[in-house]
Amino acid sequence: MYKIHVTHLAYDFKTLRNLMAKASPSRSGDYLAGVAAVNNLERVAAQWVLADVPLKQFLNEALVPYELDEVTRLIIDEHDSAAFTTISHMTVGDFRNWLLSEQATTDVLSAIAPGLTPEMVAAVSKIMRIQDLILVAKKCRVITRFRNTIGLENHFSTRLQPNHPTDNPAGVAASLLDGLLYGCGDAVIGINPASDNLEATLRLLHMLNDVIERYQIPTQSCVLAHITTTLKAIEQGAPVDLVFQSIAGTQKANNSFGINLNLLQEARLAALELGRGTLGNNCMYFETGQGSALSANAHEGLDQQTCEVRAYAVARKFKPLLVNTVVGFIGPEYLYDGKQIIRAGLEDHFCGKLMGLPMGCDVCYTNHAEVDQDDMDMLLTQFAVAGGTFIMGVPGADDVMLNYQSTSFHDALYVRQLLGLRPAPEFEQWLQQHRIFNAANQLQQQPDVPALFKPSLQQLSEYGDEQP
């Protein structure tokens, strides 16, 4: 069905799933899975064929069988045919050209988002160059709210990530206050616990809540424990703002994470019942990453980028405050070098924003990948130019608990200064009120620690230094 002749060679792509995989830009994970194009000629041939595939075909040919996969059922059952009408006559190539045209305004892109399936979005990304991904993503605007407003035009947010290898409250507090003094934390103050232990999770939740309440910070907290641990914390009356979970694009991969759609819905409803949001009720936080399904041997024959975008259909279902691709975290087996990580990060952002998600990016890499900080500076800058919603703020860009390289508090300052971007408006007002930022949204010239924070470390030590 999907055939083409190139000079003396004939290419026959048996299924849409096979065609999508062959058309995907080169990355190590697809070679590991045995689904990648054998060379650039086959890749270009597949992209050529893919450009002529009608968008309607993705509604008729499921890449993972409907009866075997609840993610597929979610995608098909909740497809908005009315929103799809505007582009229903297009091929993948037509869709690309239209996205780049002046007709595809921010309002129009928002209107069609519910009519886009992840497979359509993944397909068009495969025939786009980096500047295309940046231009279209820049036109997408997704705004969410909990205690502040995330995603407004000309704003750029950060997750303050004060991880500690033993969840020591004083160590967490030191990083937390350091990040606040650099203007980080408007997206969320989020801790990856060293253990999924309920007691440790409760201790961190109470500590973060105390900080936010004591200093009246217009932001939200999250302890990135497994969703079942967070549910137990809610049952014990813990002050849970955002419910976190890593998600993937197939039912099998989500099962490997110990989750399903019903569990995600249960957790969202439990968080909504707490009523802790003051401006809105976007109370979920999801993380994704290309290669997660393959690492669980649950990719169902899909290329890793298509599998990743299917995870965005899962995220969209639950109206999250934040979604971010942890793009280089899994390792070089899936994204080998800086070139592959940069491309993947911009693909993920484009696809997520086009589907209506508030996309951030953990601009990161592991120490055994063929990548360095110059590569990450390129992705950071391009992501910000593309209208990215938020990045991570890690002390020194070196996460001492997760043992990977990410972005620092200074990186957020660089982006905001370079592009004239501002924190979430409510958080910005708080920063200026407490003389952390001046009226021009720059750090105060004389970095005298505001009186607000002087007793903080001693006060937070009341949570104890016991290990989880």
Image (cartoon, rainbow, N blue to C red):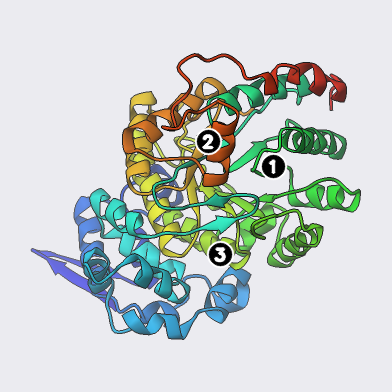
Instruction: Tell me which label, 2 or 1, sits earlier in the chain.
Output: 1
- Gap between marks 2 and 3 measured at Cα: 21 Å
Image coordinates of residue 70 in percent, x first then y, are 63, 71
Q: Amino acid at mark 3?
A: Arg
Residue at disc 1, secondary structure:
strand
Residue at disc 2, secondary structure:
strand
> Which quarter of the figure has residue 340?
top left
- Gap between marks 1 and 3 measured at Cα: 21 Å
Image coordinates of residue 282 in percent, x first then y, are 64, 59
Q: Amino acid at mark 1?
A: Ser
Q: Nearer the viewer, mark 2 or mark 1?
A: 1
Instruction: Tell me which label, 2 or 3, sits earlier in the chain.
Output: 3
Foreground of the two, 328 or 202: 202
Q: Amino acid at mark 2?
A: Met
Q: Which residue is mark 2?
A: 392
Q: Which residue is mark 3?
A: 316
137 sits to left or right of 402:
left
Instruction: Tell me which label, 1 or 3, sits earlier in the chain.
Output: 1
